[in-house]
Image (cartoon, helix red, strand yellow):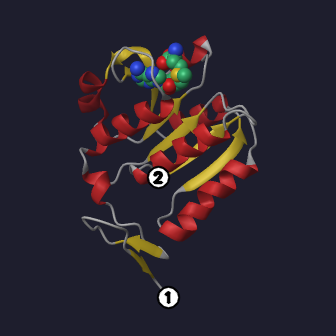
Amino acid sequence: MMVKVVVLRMGHRIFRDKRVTTHVGLVARAFGADGMIISDVSDKTVEESIRKVVQNWGGDFFVESGKSWRAVVETWRHMGGVIVHLTMYGIPVDEVIPKLKGKDILVIVGGEKMPREVFEIADFNVAIGNQPHSEIAALAIFLDRIFHGSELKKEFKNSKMKIIPTEKGKKIEIKS
Ligand code: SAM
């Protein structure tokens, strides 16, 4: 059964976080998630740069912005999915992974300070180690644990470009 994994990026600041949020989206896509929603703030620049990557490198990853995080969470729950919040204060990831098997997952990653309510609303507050680091790193490791490494072998359909792995140098196949 194919599960759905969508990332909800909270706390995006339109000027300061463009690069970090773009990287959250690129990691989400490259590590097997289906899409990313940037909550509460509309940022077409970030949306466009992620879409450009999808056009060139394939797959059907979606990106949206400007939706209220509460509405996204409510809709997800209504559809029967679980809510995972990545936070250094949570339960160790390896204890939680078995409980998520076969479930559609909304993964919340935050910025500097998260509303208390998110900790309450989440079905699982999950820590990737209990040290402060980054939403990008936390997301990459979480997705890798969910997909057990299979995400790294994923084929991205309808790509214009594909890398041919080589020991040295760069080899790219450009499709016509
Ligand atoms: N004090 C924050 C926390 O609750 O994790 C750290 C803020 S950090 C700049 C931004 C985001 O990175 C957090 O909202 C969380 O999603 C993620 N993050 C940072 N360290 C993490 C960790 N050890 N485990 C899980 N997520 C983490």
Instruction: Report the residue at 50% width, 76% height from top.
Output: 160
Where is residue 170? Give x, y as percent: 37, 69
Q: Quadrant of residue 42?
A: top right
Q: Which residue is mark 1?
A: 176
**Amino acid type, label 1:** Ser
Q: Which mark is residue 29?
A: 2
Q: Secondary structure at mark 1?
A: loop
In-image side of 53 versus 146 (left or right) = right
Q: Is residue 74 above or below residue 29?
A: above
Q: CA distance from mark 1 to mark 2?
A: 23 Å
Q: Residues within 10 Å of mark 2 (few under 14, many from 20)?
A: many
Of the pair 129 and 81, the residue shown nearer to us: 129
Where is residue 86? Give x, y as percent: 45, 25
Instruction: Report the residue at 39% width, 39% height from top.
Output: 140
Q: Earlier in the sequence, mark 1 or mark 2?
A: 2
Where is residue 51? Give x, y as percent: 61, 60
Q: Quadrant of residue 118?
A: top right
Label 2 CB-ligand 1 distance < 8 A = no
Q: Is residue 105 above or below residue 46?
A: above
Quarter of the image with the N terminus is bottom left
